[in-house]
Amino acid sequence: MDKIMKPKTWHDLTVRQWQALTDLFMEEGNSHIDNIVRSGCIVYDVTEHELDSLTMADLNDLGHRLAFIHTEVPARPVDRIDVNGKRYRCIYDVTKMPAARYIESKVYGQDPNQHLHRIMASMVWPQKRAYRIGPWMDDDYDAARHSEYAEDMLDAPITAVLGSVVFFCDVYLNLISSSRVYFTKVIMQTTRKPRIEAEDLVNNLCDNLDGIIRPSWSQRMNG
């Protein structure tokens, strides 16, 4: 099959493919051949039926071409994301973050694999052209279209999205960690919670962000 002969790298994969691969690596009991076949389907966008005709020698070759998925993603933050004919500007200033409440949600921190695209959708600003070939400019951010932005992020390069989210969470974590007293007071004032509960909320937020920066599955993928 010519389609699976072309070498691939992390730079060729999307967030959607990365999520599928990390889900696969979290499964127990798969054989080595199963993992090669299913990884090949994800990376090369083919069905298992299309790989049925491969010989063991072909499968071994495929396994060698897929070796990169056991290495660390060369993630790098970017200034913008171009995907599905659209452009999104990345925002790293927490004070200017639209829909920042999504990042603070505990469930996102518990499963960054499944929610990476949603986190990224909360830290981008959609752009548009003033006319067909004109320069890009900021469009209106519509919180009600967050799921639409997130769907676009599924098709964005994993190297750009993961790098940008990790960078943002690192900045955010450092900000909160260095301002624990301030954030505790804000929570107490806005929610009327006692100090110990407010401190627990701040600590949980830091733990959630740290989980996004250093997710538990990363060592398993590299193993």
Image (cartoon, rainbow, N blue to C red):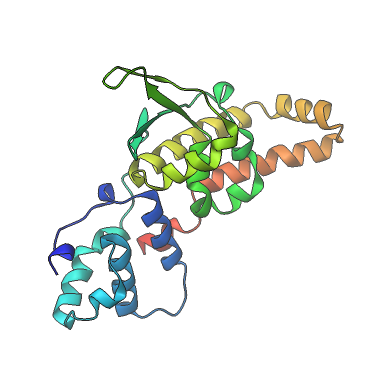
Residue 180, quarter of picture:
top right
Rendered view: 57 above or below 133: below
Q: At which x and y percent is residue 49?
A: 28, 77
Q: Nearer the viewer, residue 90 or 25?
A: 90
**Quadrant showing the N terminus:** bottom left
131 or 118, which is in the foreground? 131
x and y percentages locating residue 184 in the rendered image: 75, 30
- The relative height of residue 183 versus residue 109 in the rendered view (above or below) is above
Quarter residue 38 falls in: bottom left
Q: Quadrant of the C terminus?
A: bottom left
Which residue corresponds to the image point at 23% horizontal and 52% vertical from the top-left?
Answer: 9
Relative horizontal placement of residue 68, taking residue 170 as reference (left or right): left
Q: Position of residue 107 (x, y in %)?
A: 63, 50
| Residue 145 visible in the shown view | yes
Q: Position of residue 110 (x, y in %)?
A: 60, 53
Q: Nearer the viewer, residue 115 or 110?
A: 115
Count of picture labels: 0
Please tell me in which quadrant of the rendered image residue 146 appears. Answer: top right
The residue lying at 36 percent from left, 56 percent from top is 17
Which residue occupies 57% across, 28% down?
98
| Residue 78 in view | no
Image position of 220 with respect to 92: above or below: below
Give whichever of 184, 35 is nearer the camera.
Answer: 35
